[in-house]
Amino acid sequence: MIFLAEKTFAGLTLLQISLVSLFLLIITMNVIGGWNHGVVRQVFRLVALVLAYLAGATLGPLAASVVPLGALEGAAKITVVSIVVGFGVYLVLRLVINMVFRKTHEQESAVARIFYGSGGALIGLLTSVVFLLLTVVGLRMIGTVAEARARVLAKRGEKPPESMAGAVGNYAIQARQALENGPLALILDTVDPTPKEGYKVLANLASVTSDPEAMHRLGQYPGTQKLAEHPALRALAADAGVMKLVEEKNWLEMLRHPKVSGLFNDKSFQAELKKYEFGKALEFALKPAPAGNNLPAATPALPEEKTEVRRY
């Protein structure tokens, strides 16, 4: 990845050329595969994906409670088991679909073959475009978070962690920069449903959560203090079970906790939450500490302009 990000050809980095080539290959393979399988198989495969997701989401947590997975526990275990269950259900459904419905070339008339093939190819094109769009948005989000955290570490004079998460973050940064500064930039700005302001808020959130001083200043923001005084939130903070999940950073289980889900059903808390200016709170937390404050200056807010291509 680093090699591809450094080398250039015809004004583009090899990483940019590789990403565009990969996207075109995925679209081509899905269109050809859609033509071969036919419109009926393609439609039922989409149905199978939905059913597999529902099966993983509902049966996965139940299976995780009885299936031993060695070192994996908590949210990680549930996630892995849910993916395995969903994938297994999808494979079974695909087998049934292939047994019941015929391919395009197996249709008896030329009209039926054209209908089956063109319909399947269209579905293949649409699904591949949606998949690639979700992939690109995911890469941009992960890269935005990773780059914001890397800036905080650099400002604090710390090195990025030498771990799998650190390597993935570095690759995501390079992929994001390649996408936003390459031939796909104009297309991304047009089709990406995430507003630019959303990426800025995401970057500022990552910077704040990576900087203890910024987190402290977030708590000093008047709107944060007012929200923290809400009775429902204070009751939640006093719950030992919820606080234990927070300390363990078991966010999935915390969100499933009845008191946490009940908090967001509290109309009074919802009204206060709507008044909370989250973006302004993050910018406040990232501003330099005022004179006379004993806290060190926090990481400055990230600029809105597009990041330049970096060499690694």
Image (spheres, rainbow, N blue to C red):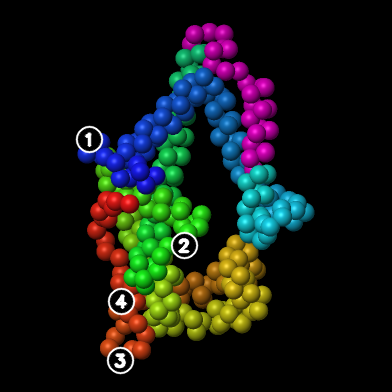
Name the residue type under label 2.
Pro
Relative to 30, does residue 277 appear above or below in the rendering?
Answer: below
Q: CA distance from mark 1 to mark 4?
A: 41 Å
Stretch of the chain drawn in magenta: 86-111
Which label was assigned to residue 10?
1
In front: label 4 or label 2: 2
Tell me which secondary structure the magenta stretch mostly adopts.
helix
Q: Residue furthest left?
A: 11
In the structure shown, which secondary structural element does the residue marked by tag 2 occupy?
A: loop
**Lateral position of residue 93 relative to residue 189, left or right:** right
Q: Specify which label sits upstream in the sequence, 3 or 1.
A: 1
Q: Secondary structure at mark 3?
A: loop
**Mark 4: amino acid:** Lys
Label 2 or label 3, whichever comes before in sequence order: 2
Dot 3 corresponds to which residue?
A: 292
Q: Is residue 30 left or right of residue 277?
A: right
Q: CA distance from mark 4 to mark 2?
A: 26 Å
Residue drawn at 40 percent across, 69 percent down? 158
At 46% from the left and 79% from the top, the residue drawn is 227
Do the residues bearing badges 2 and 3 touch, measured as CB atoms within 8 Å?
no
Compared to residue 62, the image places residue 222 above or below, namely below
Question: Do the residues under discs 3 and 1 have CB atoms within 8 angstroms?
Answer: no
